[in-house]
Image (spheres, rainbow, N blue to C red):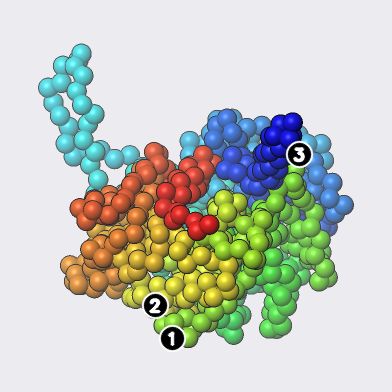
Amino acid sequence: MKMKLLKSFAIALSLISAFVKAETDQQRLSAVDLFQLEYAADLEISPNGDRVYFVRHFMDIQSDKKLGNIWFVDLDGKMRPLTSGKHSDRGLALSPDGQKLAYTSNASGSSQIHMMWLDNGQQAKLTNLQEAPAQLSWSPDGRFLAFSQFVPEETKAPVSLKGKPSDAKWAEPAVFIDDLYYRQDGAGYNKPGHQQIFVLSTDGGTPRQLTFDAFDHGGPLSWGADGQHLYFSANRHADHEMVPLNTELYRLAIDSGEIQALTDRNGPDQSPHVSPDGKWLAYLGFDDKGTNYENQRLYLMPTEGGKNKVLTSDLDRSINQIQWDAKSKGLYFSFDDMGKTKLAYQSLNGNRQILTDTLGGQSLGRPYASGEFAVSKGDAVAFSYSVPSRPADVALVKSGKTKVLTHLNEDALGHKTLARVEEIWFKSSADNLDIQGWVAYPPDFDPAKQYPLILEIHGGPVANYGPHFASEIQLYAAAGYVVLYVNPRGSDSYGEDFAQKIHLNYPSQDYDDLMSGVDALIKKGNIDPKRLYVTGGSGGGVLTAWIVGHTDRFKAAVVAKPVINWFSFVLTADYYPFFTQYWFGKKPWEDMQGYMQRSPISYVGNVKTPTMLLTGEADYRTPISETEQFYQALKLQGVETAMVRIPGASHGIYMRPSNLMSKVEYILWWFSQYQPAQEP
């Protein structure tokens, strides 16, 4: 009888334990939960600031795509959809009077310009374009929309085969390429043609092309106050292909098509914004000194051209987005600072005020900086709101007070126990430089225990991580890992000097920064030094491959979409004129030793760490041939390795939710194969 009772008790305990585990598992984020996530983007705000329009992005599990519909939210947090369906609406542009909303949508099967009358919700498709429109911009009187569109150009192959019988099935004809830029990551092989500027009546009709020259005329478009001119940025220099950053500002006369250059310097001048009173042109740019990074500054000049002045010369940060206030007295702008994106207002007399540091939340995979804002005529500012536990919501800041208007992911994440994210600072062993990072702890973190650590490294290499929601980080933590992510030297948001420390010197002491972060976390006592793992993508893949060639302290590594051999990389990547000029200063055959000294392939003979590689097969930024080189080299060395190829994926593997799931699940699987036996 006693044995039966003990057996029954043991079974009951087992059932309770299984129930508790199942309940705990349900409370943790899982890979399939990615399809439940939403985020806000493309914000527009009504003139009086009482309503914010935005695209509510969602993940469609059937098509495995990110889609989006238009919603609005009022100051009380009440939301309403304006469009619905499994398609993508984007590029919102609110009319000057706030009565109509223009946007692009592929609801009809291809990307077209649509119009919505906000008083009655009526919608209409205004165009039947052959190529996707972009950069919608209203004329001041609300009668016209300017936009840019790719215009194909006809080309004829220099060779035409003769003698083909009418019923023969020959191979596809050879493809002749003589363009400097012939393929682009995420878009594939380029079609001949250029981005041109058009204007369209807001009553519909036939768009009128305004630019015709063989240059790309993309980027934001801004109308002059008289409605007779458009301002844009382009690289119209004769050697434009070999000087990729050298854009200028131009003034385009709508009626005559005359184009006047307003700037002329070596460096980018871009993002023109005409003041509401029509007197001033604000824009962004910098003097190109050939370095890996320069701060993008905010400039001001008369709209007719002339002498300019810098408004942010005292700010050692790069300016992102700009927008005028309603009275032409100053500008709102955003900038990244120590991993956060801040919103500021600066009057033309130089006074500056920080309004919030919580912009972001639009990078779902990894915790990159992001964010956007829109300004009403009453100077209420709507922005994408970021916290470590949620993707972007809509918030409003006015008179120094912030109000969060949406809670888009409470249904998906409100019942989940997510990782706690904590800031960490430490000194680099290389030179005592201060380095910032963040630690994500497992949902059931117990400070009395030791945990395995994943060091996750950002790409760029000039970019920055911060305290933002990141599904990859959260999923690693949900699997029981402490996750460390760091902004080593070379990251932006810390000023020019910090970012330029890797100029012609990457990888270098950024390796020491990362190792110092691992050491600092181990000293806290919660990390098992026998269970260290490392991964990173793009520039983070470079550093991961560099790490396993310089230390054996990690049990396993996953190198995602890396550069392994700088010589072969610059001769196969899509943006090769930029890489040779700004990352090396010389062509590969002019500095073979320098290229190879900075290539992880040069240190493959040192690698003992089990290393898996993961890359999209359609990646033209860090082509999969780089991955194949390291994989085969590791095989020759007898190192435990594997290669994961993501079919059809470009450099942005996360663009399809299932690809992001595959990335995370393969990384966690690989690390699980190299878990040391736990001591009793």
- Give the CA distance from mark 3 to mark 1: 54 Å
Q: Residues within 10 Å of mark 2 (few under 14, many from 20)?
A: some
Residue position marked by numbered label 2 in the rendering: 509
- Please name whichever residue, 543 or 419, is drawn nearer the observer in this view of the structure: 419
- Please name whichever residue, 677 or 476, is drawn nearer the observer in this view of the structure: 677
Question: Vertical placement of 165 versus 576: above or below?
Answer: above
For image coordinates 42% across by 79% down, the residue present is 501
**Which corner quadrant holds the N terminus?**
top right
Which kind of residue does numbered mark 1 sit on?
A: Asp
Residue position marked by numbered label 1 in the rendering: 431
Give the percent coordinates (x, y) of residue 20.
71, 43
> Can residue 124 be seen here?
no
For image coordinates 54% across by 75% down, the residue present is 523
Question: Vertical placement of 213 versus 90: above or below?
Answer: below
Give the percent coordinates (x, y) of residue 557.
40, 57
Q: Residues within 10 Å of mark 1 (few under 14, many from 20)?
A: few
